[in-house]
Image: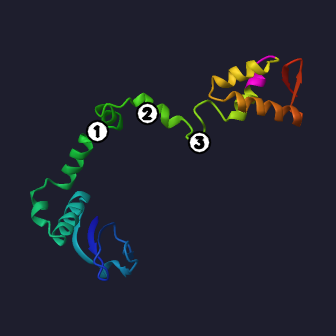
């Protein structure tokens, strides 16, 4: 059983399912015995209870006439569910490429598009290239958007710190 009930303190309307000993207003929290609550309708049909509550709220806000011209709440819900456009349909109708949007959503916005930070790219060049020269590392990093000046400074720091060794113009991570 469903009941449309109201709060005598804040005038909130809601639907109760079943019959409990006491009920609390979802808005203000006022607790009362079920029998003490004002029941505007009691019904076995949840859609009927929803319809009554919606009508009362419309009348309260001065839109009772407009509500009377509408289909039932259940019918409106069906129309909305049937008429919803998916995100993909909406984006395609707007002329946007949904595959491009999906791939953009998968990228980490904090990570540069070049495939890592500048230092990570230099480290990766050292790991992937076999005993590379500075020119090879500069070329590798340059293809990923890292400047030659940065690579030169990074190699110098890595060599000084002992993370990389340089011998005969070739670099090797330690």
Q: Are marks 3 and 2 in contact (CB under 8 Å)?
A: no
Foreground mark, 3 or 2? 3
Q: Secondary structure at mark 2?
A: helix
Kindly indicate the quadrant of the structure image that contains residue 37: bottom left
- Identify the residue under disc 2: 101
Highlighted magenta segment, given as a residue range: 125-130
* Residue linked to disc 3: 110
In the rendered image, residue 126 lying in the magenta stretch gets the answer yes
Residue at the spot of label 1: 85
Q: CA distance from mark 3 to mark 2?
A: 17 Å
Q: Is residue 29 above or below residue 151?
A: below
Say which label, 1 or 2, has the lower sequence index: 1
Give the quarter of the figure containing the N terminus.
bottom left
- Residue 17: in magenta span: no
Q: Position of residue 156 (x, y in %)?
A: 82, 32
Total marks shown come to 3
Front-lying residue, 112 or 18:
112
Mark 3 and 1 residues: CB-CB less than 8 Å, in contact? Answer: no
Element under label 1?
A: loop
Residue 103 placement (x, y as % from top left): 49, 31
At 38% from the left edge and 29% from the top edge, which residue is drawn?
Answer: 97
In front: label 1 or label 2: 2
Q: Secondary structure at mark 3?
A: loop
**Mark 1 to mark 2 CA distance (whole Å):** 17 Å
Where residue 102 sits: x, y (%)? 45, 33
Predominant secondary structure in magenta?
A: helix
Q: Nearer the viewer, mark 3 or mark 1?
A: 3
Residue 78 location in percent, x, y?
Answer: 23, 46
Residues at marks 3 and 1, CA–CA distance in whole angstroms = 31 Å
């Amino acid at each position: 059983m469903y009941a449309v009930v109201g709060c005598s303190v804040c005038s909130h309307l809601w639907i109760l399912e079943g019959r409990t000993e006491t009920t609390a207003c979802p808005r203000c929290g006022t607790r009362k015995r079920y029998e003490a609550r004002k029941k505007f309708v009691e019904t076995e049909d949840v859609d009927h209870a929803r319809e009554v509550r919606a009508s009362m709220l419309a009348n309260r806000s001065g839109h009772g006439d407009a509500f009377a011209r509408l289909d039932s709440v259940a019918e409106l819900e069906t129309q909305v569910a049937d008429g919803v456009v998916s995100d993909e349909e909406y984006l395609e109708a707007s002329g946007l490429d949904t595959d491009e949007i999906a791939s953009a959503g998968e990228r980490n916005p904090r990570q540069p598009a070049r495939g890592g930070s500048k230092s990570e790219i230099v480290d990766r060049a050292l790991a992937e290239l076999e005993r590379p020269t500075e020119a090879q590392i500069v070329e590798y990093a340059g293809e990923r958007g890292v400047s030659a000046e940065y690579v030169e400074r990074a190699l110098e720091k890595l060599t000084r710190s002992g993370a990389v060794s340089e011998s005969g113009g070739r670099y090797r991570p330690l």
